[in-house]
Amino acid sequence: MQASRENLLNFAALCFWLITSVTMAAFAFLEYGQDFRGYYAAARVLLEGGNPYDYTQVAGVLVEVTGRAGNNPFYYPLWFGWSLTPLSLLAFQPARALWMIINVALWINGLFRLQQFLGLPQYGWRNWFWNLLATFLFAWTTWKFEQTGILLFAISVEILVSYQKQQWNRLGIFLALALIKPNVMLLPVLALGIWLTRNKKWKPVLIAGLVLLALLLLTTILTPDWYQPFSRPHFGQGLTEVLDGPNQVTGTRLNTTLLDWLQWYSVPPVAGYVIYGITVILGMWILGQHIWKSDSILHVAVWALLVSFAATPYALQYDFPPLTIVLFTALAASSQIPSKWIPTILLTFIASVLIWERPISDGYWIVIGLCLLTAWAFRTTVSKARLVNHTRSTG
């Protein structure tokens, strides 16, 4: 009887997570939507022989397809734009729907793959509850803005799985693909590359370099003048200001970064830069210690992601899905510790941010909470392991 109730609870929790996820994605598709417009327009420009980094060309397609220009300059690697050209062959709304379906599939599959990598139980209501929490924390915002965060999460998981299976070619390819967004993934890729090299795993690093070189050469052949708009005045304007077409400024952008977070709480600029500098130095020191001393790719990845999101000068909350790896790793470590009140308090705080946050810069509290949770879980498990080893040696 007890087993039957447990199975029923497990099945109900699984259905609740999946139904909730699909419902959230459908609601985001119907009521929100933002950045797929830019991907679609950039891909259309490429197919027409244009330059996606020329916002004038992209804005023309945006107005034609959606009726407005909006704040959608294209700042991604050229190979990412070319990879989206098959979607641009569809009408805009069907292409949007397909992009959402791909993201939902990548998210669900990525969570299963991550849990398998971490050695967590593959079934059970607790697992489905953690998946629901991660979906609420990370996937929801990304679905609302139709961003690439879930794609980055899926790629990050495949990096870890490829290492676990010693699939070095595959690992190198995914390391290269992770650079879709260098502003948040460059540091993790560099950290993993250095760690792999230090551990005499040269092949994936070499493959990643060759893949990036091949992508650069191929896309340069397809779009020879792609770099020309970079030297034009106001090229990066869309990163700091809200636009509604070329040179049409409608506001100042607020990001989910330490500097924007401090600015929102009225910290003086000089003090803000000092705090930011200390954070960068401390974060790089912690990461360097793990790269040099750790024998776990997971630990290096976790701290690289935390330091990257803590210190990056440009990120938004929809970039956060790779932090699911941090969350689940901390949860797995916390499960080995009898005392649950500290992780419970921290998890409750992290989950509450989406409820009370006002500007998007408040999302930085999630990064702070994850740093505290990870530091506590790792420190406690290390202390516990040392105690066990000491007891065995003196017993």
Image (cartoon, rainbow, N blue to C red):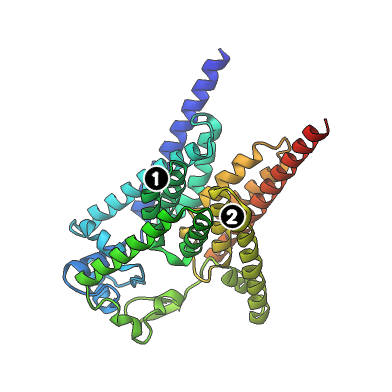
Q: Quadrant of residue 37?
A: bottom left
Residue 143: x and y, percent?
A: 40, 53
In the displayed structure, does residue 209 sit left or right of residue 381? left
Horizontally, is 223 left or right of 105 in the view?
Answer: left
Q: As rendered, which of 178 and 347 lies closer to the eye? A: 178
Q: Are marks 1 and 2 in contact (CB under 8 Å)?
A: no
Closer to the camera in the image, 166 or 250: 166
* Residue drawn at x 66%, y 66% as measured from the top left: 282
Up/down of 158 relative to 191, above or below: above
User: As displayed, is residue 23 above or below residue 314?
Assistant: above
For the view shown, which residue lies furthest in the top direction? 1
The outermost residue toward the front is: 200
- The answer to which quarter of the image holds residue 223 is bottom left
The C terminus appears in which quarter of the rendering? top right
Question: Disc 1 or 2, which lies upstream in sequence?
Answer: 1
Disc ID at residue 97: none
The residue tagged 1 is 167
| Pick the front one: 319 or 37 | 319
Identify the residue at image location x=34%, y=70%: 72
Q: Is residue 351 left or right of residue 33?
A: right
The Cα–Cα distance between marks 1 and 2, rounded to whole angstroms, is 38 Å
Neighbours of disc 1 within 10 Å: few (<14), some (14-19), many (20+): few
Local secondary structure at mark 2: helix
Compared across the picture, whether 179 is left or right of 369 comes to left
Q: Which mark is residue 353?
A: 2
Q: Nearer the viewer, mark 1 or mark 2?
A: 1
Q: Secondary structure at mark 1?
A: loop
Dot 2 amino acid type: Val
x%, y% of residue 370? Answer: 61, 53
Residue 21, compared with residue 262, is above or below; it is: above
